[in-house]
Image: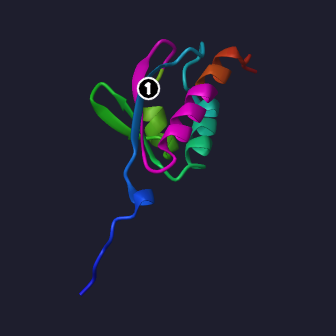
Amino acid sequence: MILRRSHPSDKLIVVSRQITVQNELGLHARPAAEFVRVANGFRAEITLIKDQQRFSASSLIDVLRANLDCGASAMLEARGADAEAAITRLEKLLVEFRSRKED
């Protein structure tokens, strides 16, 4: 018989925020790859939700399939102990993309 006990640190934390892509070229290959790299640095499960479709933020193909052009809005959702930190960091990264000049 296996017993599982809940521990306070096991609580599922879910954080979601609306984001709008401000980068002129949208979330194309290079910034999408960086977005995925940063997302994979967190333990939380991070998802982009656009037009009622869910895309894994840990998959470059999914992030590109989300088709986040300049001005596009999506919901960024994270589930896990570091969800708040993940959302905050990814939002900051999207702002950084806006101020970068592309090669």
> Residue placed farthest to the bottom in the image?
1
> Residue placed farthest to the front in the image?
8
- The residue wearing badge 1 is 67
Q: Answer above or below: position of 52 versus 7.
A: above
Q: Nearer the viewer, residue 99 or 88?
A: 88
Q: Answer above or below: position of 17 versus 11.
A: above
Residue 48 is covered by the magenta coloring? no
Colouring convention used in this rendered image of the protein: rainbow
Please indicate whether residue 26 sits to the left or right of residue 78 in the image. Answer: right
Quadrant occupied by the N terminus: bottom left
Q: Quadrant of residue 13?
A: top left
Q: Nearer the viewer, residue 78 or 31?
A: 78
- Residue at 60% in and 49% down: 41
Please indicate whether residue 58 sits to the left or right of residue 33 in the image. Answer: left
| Residue 88 percent location from the top left of the image | 56, 32
Quadrant occupied by the C terminus: top right
- Residue at 52% in and 53% down: 43
Q: Nearer the viewer, residue 52 or 90?
A: 90
Q: Quadrant of residue 50?
A: top left
- Residue at 74% in and 16% down: 101
Residue 86 is covered by the magenta coloring? yes
Amino acid at pointer 1: Asn
| Residue 86 percent location from the top left of the image | 54, 40
For the record, the magenta segment spans 69-93
Report how many numbered discs are placed on residues in the image: 1
- Residue at 56% in and 27% down: 91
Circle 1 residues within 10 Å: few <14, some 14–19, many ≥20: few
